[in-house]
Amino acid sequence: MLKVSNAILSSRDLTLTIGGRTILDHVNLDVRPNEIVTVIGPNGAGKSTLVRCLLGLQAITSGEVVKSSGLRVGYVPQRFPQTPNVPLDVRRLLSLTLKPTEAEIEAALAETGIAHLINAAVSRLSGGELQRALLARALLRKPELLVLDEPVQAVDFMGEARLYELIADIRRRHGCGILMVSHDLHMVMAESDHVVCLNGHVCCEGGPNKVQQDPEFAKLFGPAAARMIAAYTHRHDHDHDSHGHHDHPHHRH
C-alpha cells in the first residue's frame, strides 16, 4: 500500500472479525504530523479496538496498517491497571518502562502541570491528576505520535477543558501527530483538525464543521448534539490574522 503523503500512521481497509462478528469493517484512517485526529462514536463502536489494531496490540483479519519507519509512539490507554497493594509514586510511574533522568521526569511533570506531585502516591491522585501523570509518561518517549484513548474520563467538566487545552498545547509545542478517542463531542470537535465518526465502519469524517452537519452524525448522536457543538466551534471559525487571512488557531508556531 502507498502511504498517504507525510502520514505517520495509516490504515487501509482495516477489518477485524472475531467469532464470525465483524468488529471493524474496512476502516481507512491517516494521521499526519502536527495534526489532531479524533475518533468519536457510540459505546461499542470499536474505538478502543481500532486503537489497539493501529498500535499492533491486536491482530487484524485483513487490510493493513503502515507506520513511519522507527515511529516513536506515546500511548495513554483507556484504563491504567493499578495494583492497590504495590506502593507506586509518580516518579516511579514515569520510570517503569524507561530510564529517564530526574531532570527529564521533572520537565515532563512541569509540562503537564503536576510538578508538585512527583512524590505523590499514584493511588491518591484524582482522575485528572492521573491522566496528567500518564501524559507526562507518554511525553518522556519524545513521541512523534501521541495516542490518547478517552483522555478525560473520570475528570470533571472544568478539568476536561483544561486537559484538552493541555493536549492542544502539546501538539503546538512538539508538532507531534495526536490520535485521540473520545466521547466528549463539544470539546473534541473544537480542538480537532480531522474527526472520524466510527460505528464499526467509518460513518463520516472530515473537519469538525463538515462532520457535525453530516446526517450520519445526527443519526448516531442525535440532532441536538450537532446544534450544541456548533455553539462551541463557532469561535474557532472567525480567527483571522492581520492581513485578513483565515489562520487556523492550532497551526501557529
Image (tube, rainbow, N blue to C red):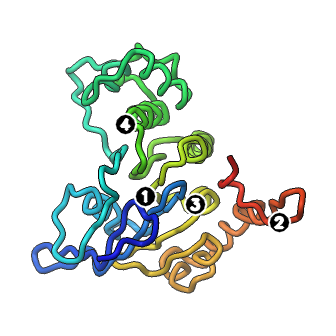
The residue that appears at 54% across and 29% down in the rendered structure is: 111
Taking 243 as reference, is 5 left or right? Answer: left
Q: Is residue 12 above or below residue 184?
A: below
Q: Tag 4, which secondary structure? A: loop
Q: Is residue 181 above or below residue 157?
A: below
For the residue carrying disc 4, how many other residues have a C-alpha within 10 Å: few (<14), some (14-19), or many (20+)?
some
Which label lies toward us, 3 or 2? 2
Please report contact status of discs 3 and 1: CB closer than 8 Å, yes or no.
no
Mark 1 or mark 4: name the one nearer the start of the chain.
Answer: 4
- Which label number is shown at residue 181? 1
Separation of disc 3 and disc 1 at Cα? 11 Å
Residue furthest to the bottom in view is 215
The picture places residue 122, in percent across and down from the top left corner, at: 36, 24
Q: Amino acid at mark 1?
A: Val
Identify residue for label 4: 141
Q: Amino acid at mark 3?
A: Ser
Q: Quadrant of residue 95?
A: top left
Identify residue for label 2: 245
Which label lies toward us, 3 or 1? 3
Mark 4 or mark 3: name the one nearer the start of the chain.
Answer: 4
Q: Is residue 211 above or below residue 120?
A: below
The N terminus lies in which quarter of the figure? bottom left
Mark 3 or mark 1: name the one nearer the start of the chain.
Answer: 1
Q: Amino acid at mark 4?
A: Arg
Q: Tag 2, which secondary structure? A: loop
The residue that appears at 51% across and 20% down in the rendered structure is: 115
Mark 3 or mark 2: name the one nearer the start of the chain.
Answer: 3
Separation of disc 1 and disc 2 at Cα? 31 Å
Which label lies toward us, 1 or 4? 4
- Which label number is shown at residue 192? 3
Q: Tag 1, which secondary structure? A: strand
